[in-house]
Amino acid sequence: MMTISAAEHRRFGRAKRIARLLAALVAAQSVAQLLGVLTGFLLLRWLDIKQYAEYTLAFGFGSTLATLVDLGFSDSIVPLVGSRARDPHIFGQYMKAALVLRRRLLVVLLPLSAVAFFALTDGRGWSLGANVALFASVILTLLSRVLVDFYTTPLQMLGKYSAFYGTQLVTSGLRLVLSAVLEFSRTLTGWSAALTNACVMGLSGILYRRRASQYVVLPQEADARRTKEITHLMTPALPGLVFTAFQGQITVFLVATFGDTPGIAQIGALGRFGQFFAIFAALNQVLVAPRFAQLPAERVLGGAIYAVAASAGFAAVVSGFAFAFPQPLLLLLGHSYANLKREIGWCVVGGGIGLVTGVVYAINVARRFVWWRWTMAGLATILITEIACAVTFNLGSVLQLQYFAAITAAAGLAVQVVTFWYGMRHGPRVLGADPPSR
């Protein structure tokens, strides 16, 4: 009879615990995501082309601006806190410093963003009232994201998944209900849908702050040493973060510049299929970054191979399905988007590559693999790729914009993989800070 050693038994037990945790997280995220997907596809059917174009532009602009206002400050908390996550004073010091830095950027960027937003919407025949309401949704989203981005971090690092997903499920369900109420009361428009999203996000932030407050003690003033650590870690990443802020919504901005209103709506509709990857992409912040920030150095490579292989396998399966069976996906979009057969497949490919890129990026930041040389080399690589694609493809074509997005996503993945390889050979640029306080 074959016997199992104590070490093998421990490894087997650890593997079982990880599998159970992963299954529970995927199940919880799946339910929350399905509520979001259902709401998104209902909005596709309920809003006409013009209204959905308004909603898409506001959402894309808000997402880009939120990244610019944060510039990785909230992401820096995880790698810098590391194994000291159970010390609420350490957590509070880093959070306060990051909050102050983000507040300063918000004051500078908000007036500039107003000019940019109204320039984008000018000449589209949208009413002034609708444009003002859409921009109001952008502002409310920015303020709400501060609470969401910061107060979910302690819940994720400490494994308080019930509090994290409980809030997400409640607010996702509320968003669906409110959207349905607007539709049946005949008050659903592009701007009312955008404002509803922003208000629900604001409620999410308030609930997250309430549930995370016991794990964080915020000081009255930002600690200069913690502020310096955050800026030292994230400064080399700033050019890449600014670039990524626009990169994430680049197809929306390109079709808004070179295409027409139906093109904006089609890009927004295709973007709904990014939800196929959102379940796993959300695990980057919930599981991947917190775990790798606290993982012993000797286990990083094996864990990274496992995480990348799992995400790449999932992306390949979903992409294959989108090319082989586009018709069921088109039914979800509705008859207004029935001509997007090839576009769906390439959109899903780009989203799949982005999923894998997100996993590698989360690992790089968690392990503090951030260098000026690789940030600038990466930007140059992606920019050259985009220029080549811009020369080659018709930027007013929704299909060719999907080619553009998939190819540039592949360039971004290559940059993150090279950065990880360099980090494994040379170690982190920023070393760990002081031990937990007693």
Image: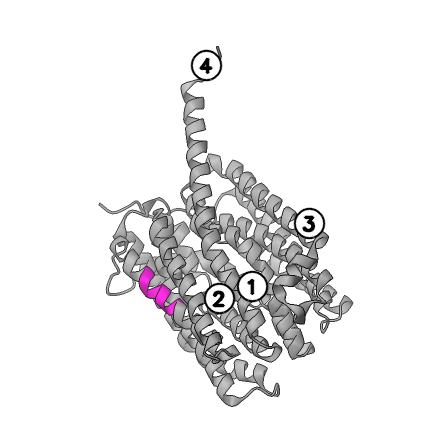
Mark 1–mark 2 distance (CA, rounded to whole Å): 8 Å
Tag 4 residue: 3
On screen, residue 264 versus residue 99, left or right, reads right
Task: Check the image and report above or below for 12 versus 234.
Answer: above
**322 to the left or right of 211:** right
User: Is 333 placed above or below 377 here?
Assistant: below
Q: Which residues fall within the magenta stretch?
A: 201-208
Is 306 situated above or below 272? above
Which residue does the numbered mark 1 point to in the structure image? Answer: 244
Labels 1 and 2: the sequence-earlier one: 2
Question: Is label 1 in a helix, a strand or a loop?
Answer: helix
Quarter occupied by residue 106: bottom left
Q: CA distance from mark 2 to mark 3?
A: 31 Å
- Structural distance between the alpha carbons of marks 3 and 4: 43 Å
Which mark is in front, 3 or 4?
A: 3
- Residue at the image point whose x is 41% and y is 50% from the top: 79
Residue situated in front as seen by the camera: 96 or 319: 319
Q: Are marks 2 and 3 in contact (CB under 8 Å)?
A: no
Q: Which residue is mark 2?
A: 67
Marks 2 and 3: which is nearer the front?
Answer: 3
Q: Amino acid at mark 4?
A: Thr
Q: Is residue 155 magenta?
A: no
| Amino acid type of the residue that numbered disc 2 sits on in the rendered structure | Thr
Residue 359 badge: none
Q: Secondary structure at mark 2?
A: helix
Q: Work out how far the residue at label 4 is from the one at label 1, CA to CA, in angstroms.
A: 52 Å
